[in-house]
Amino acid sequence: MELTISHNFTELNEYTLTQINAGSFWGVVGGVAQVIAGVGMIIGGAGLLAVPEPTTATKFGGAAAIIGGVAMIGGGIAQIASNL
């Protein structure tokens, strides 16, 4: 980060300004959408496990959907936190 001081002001060059990540409203919206999608994956996975005569494929698919949903919720929460 290159800083120069002139006339009692700190000046940042254009490259340094592009490195500042202050978060955004759309980053928070994307994180919320990711959390909602994760909840949907968990519900879908539970639905696969609740099939009246589950096969091995539906058991593995349901477990994978639940694990993926939990991971997606964690990623969404991290995205929300980094954009606040």
Image (cartoon, rainbow, N blue to C red):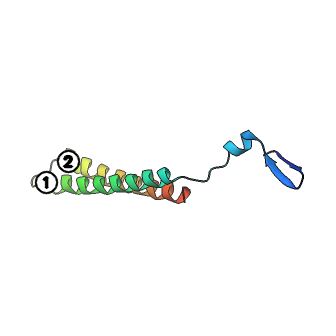
Q: Residue at x 33, y 52 (%)?
A: 37
- Say few, some or many: other residues with alpha carbon within 10 Å of mark 1 (under 14 / 14 to 19 / 20 or more): few
- Mark 1 → mark 2, Cα distance in angstroms: 8 Å
* Lateral position of residue 13 relative to residue 30, left or right: right
Quadrant for the C terminus, please.
Answer: bottom right
Residue 20 percent coordinates (x, y): 67, 49
**Looking at the rendering, which quadrant does residue 19 occupy?**
top right
Nearest the eye: 83 or 50: 83
Q: Residue at x 67, y 42 (%)?
A: 18
All told, the count of numbered labels is 2
Nearest the eye: 37 or 18: 18
Residue 44 percent coordinates (x, y): 23, 53
In the rendered structure, which amino acid carries the disc numbered 2?
Thr
Q: Residue furthest top?
A: 15
Q: Residue furthest front?
A: 7
Question: For the residue labelled by badge 2, is the local secondary structure a helix, a strand or a loop?
Answer: helix
40 lies above or below 16: below
* Lateral position of residue 56 relative to residue 83, left or right: left
Q: Are marks 1 and 2 in contact (CB under 8 Å)?
A: yes
Q: Which mark is residue 58?
A: 2
Q: Residue furthest left?
A: 52
Q: Residue at x 50, y 54 (%)?
A: 25
Per the image, the residue denoted by label 1 is 51
